[in-house]
Every structure is written in C-alpha cells, then in structure tokens.
Image: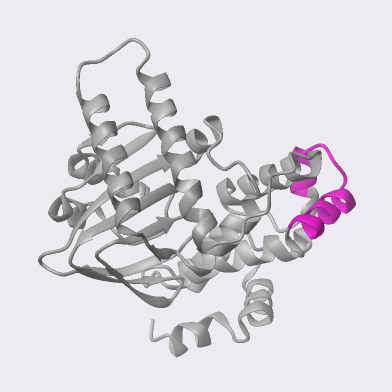
Amino acid sequence: MIAKDSDKKSLEKAAIYCDDLVVLIDDVQALKSAGTTGKPNGYAAILCTQGLADVNIDNKPHQVKTGDLFICQPNLFIEKFTMDSDFQCRAIGMSLQYVKQINLTGGNIWDIKLFFDQNPIIHLLPEETNTFCQYYDLLVSKLTGRHIKYHKELMGALLKAFAYEFRDVLERVVSVKPPTYTSGQHIFKEFLELLSTSRPKPRAVAFYSDRLCITPKYLSAVCKEASGQTASELINQYVVKDIVYLLHQPDKSIKDIAFELDFPNLSFFGKYVKKHLGMSPKMYRKENKL
C-alpha cells in the first residue's frame, strides 16, 4: 500500500487482512511501525475517522482531519506522516495489477488522476463516510471469515460495488467527462500504467510505443488528445518525480541516483535535473535542507 517493499512484513502485521491483492488496516499504532513514508506501490484510500494527522505529499504539507479521505496513487511521494495520539483511520490498499484486473479505473482516467494529484485529500459528507465504513466492515467480515470457493470473485464484486458508490463522490468534487471507450483512451490508460510500473523509467517515447505496438508519433497524439501534453512531457513529469523522491533519500549519493535511474553519466543527469528543477541535484538538496 504505502510501505516500501522492505516494510512488507511490518505491513502484514499491521493489517487486519493482507494478501498480494488487497490490504485492510485499522490499527493505527501498528500502521506507524509498518512504514508510512515513501512511494506507494499501489492504490490506497485512507479515511480518517478521528483525530488529526500531518503529511507531506509531493513536498507540500497537508493535514488530514476527521472525515477526510486520503487517496494514494502510485508515484506520490509521501513523507513526514505524523499522527495525533487519538488518530484513527480505516485504510483499503490494492495492488496496481489488481486495480487493472477488476477495471476500477474506468471512465476518463486522466481527469481523475489529475484531480487527485492536485487534491489527494477530500472531505466526505457524513453519509459518504458511513458508506465507506459500511463497505470496509463488509470487506473485513467476508475476507476474514469462513473461506469460500469464490473468495476472489466476491472480493472483486465488493470492491467494484464500492467503486460505483464512490463515483457519486467523484461527481460531487470533480468534473469527470463521460467515458468514450475509444482505442485512444485505452492506449492512454495502458501508457499511464506502463509509466507507473516501469522502474527505472525509460525516457524515450519509443520504449513505450514499442510495447503498445504503435508509433511514437501516434502515442504522442493520443496523449495530447487525452491530457493536453505530449508523451515526452508526461514521461519527464514521472521521471522528475522519481528524481525528487530519490534526492530526498539522504543515504543515496547523487551518483547512485543517476545510476539507479539509468542516466549514462553524472553530467547528463545534472543537466537533466537543472533543466527540469531549475537547479543542480546538489543545490536542490541544499535548498531543501536534505
């Protein structure tokens, strides 16, 4: 969910239910020890049912209060997650593969993704909070109870039902275009999934177009129509987020980061960072006191 891969065992201990597809957590004290900083490797919805928490999301401070829903998407950079002693929450996490498998990201994915990139925390109405808790409790009941033959099918059906209910919340807080189900929208969705799951992220448009069996020119045209940005611009956005995340890891040298992100040398990496962040990697760390 939120934890790094190295924190997987701690996450399993914190969860009331955990498998390779879904994680359910309501034990805040256990969640603290599971690791609540880093980059999500899946999707998560965390509802605050009591108290306050402070968190930095993509280097911006946010506060989570009672009734707030925190939507975690892959590639968010989460740090400094601190909770008051009375903080309580209910969290549902899902792997990237599972979200894709049960098709929870239908509709205009770019509108939704862009909204939650800019507004990762939304406040729910009382009836919406009740609905979230009802589905959470039902999921806990079914997933931790007697094992049935169609366990995975039941889990998928419940999560899909929850997603349909949540569409009402989305329509209240964000203007979502009706789904078009065109081949271009399908390609764009697959492209975003490739960007989210590729580590390190290749910076050449051709890498992604080859895997989608289309030309780089067509991929850029699809991205422009769906998001207003070219494929190259979107790739750079995702790469820069990875760079910022790694620059915030004090145990990693700039040379190690350049190597991890598959840059040919330190000079090329430095020029790329300066172009997109307006300063050198060393200066970025100094400016951000890292």
Across and down, in percent, residue 174 comes to: 56, 61
In this rendered view, identify the residue nearer to me: 230 or 269: 230
Q: Is residue 201 above or below residue 59?
A: above
Furthest residue toward top? 149
Q: Is residue 209 magenta?
A: yes
- Viewer can see residue 3: no
Could you tell me which residue is drawn at 24 percent across and 33 percent down? 140
Position of 245 with respect to 225 (left or right) is left
Q: Is residue 115 left or right of residue 232?
A: left
- The x, y position of residue 35, in whole percent, is 26, 56
Quarter of the image with the C terminus is: bottom left
Judged from this view, the residue extending furthest toward the left is 85
Colour scheme of the rendered structure: one colour
Report the span colored magenta.
207-226
245 vs 274, left or right, is: left
Answer whether residue 235 is visible to the viewer in this image.
yes
Q: Is residue 146 magenta?
A: no
Residue shown at 22%/41% (left/top)? 15
**Residue for point 56% across, 34% down:** 103
Q: Position of residue 44 (x, y in %)?
A: 39, 49
98 or 279, nearer to the observer: 98
Residue 100 found in image quarter: top right
* In-front residue for pair 4/157: 157
Q: Is residue 26 above or below residue 17?
A: below
Location of residue 280 by image quarter: bottom right
At x 46% / y 54%, what residue is drawn? 169
The secondary structure that most of the magenta stretch takes on is helix
Taking the image as shown, residue 274 lies to the left or right of residue 251, namely right
Instruction: Indicate whether 83 appears above or below 10.
Output: below
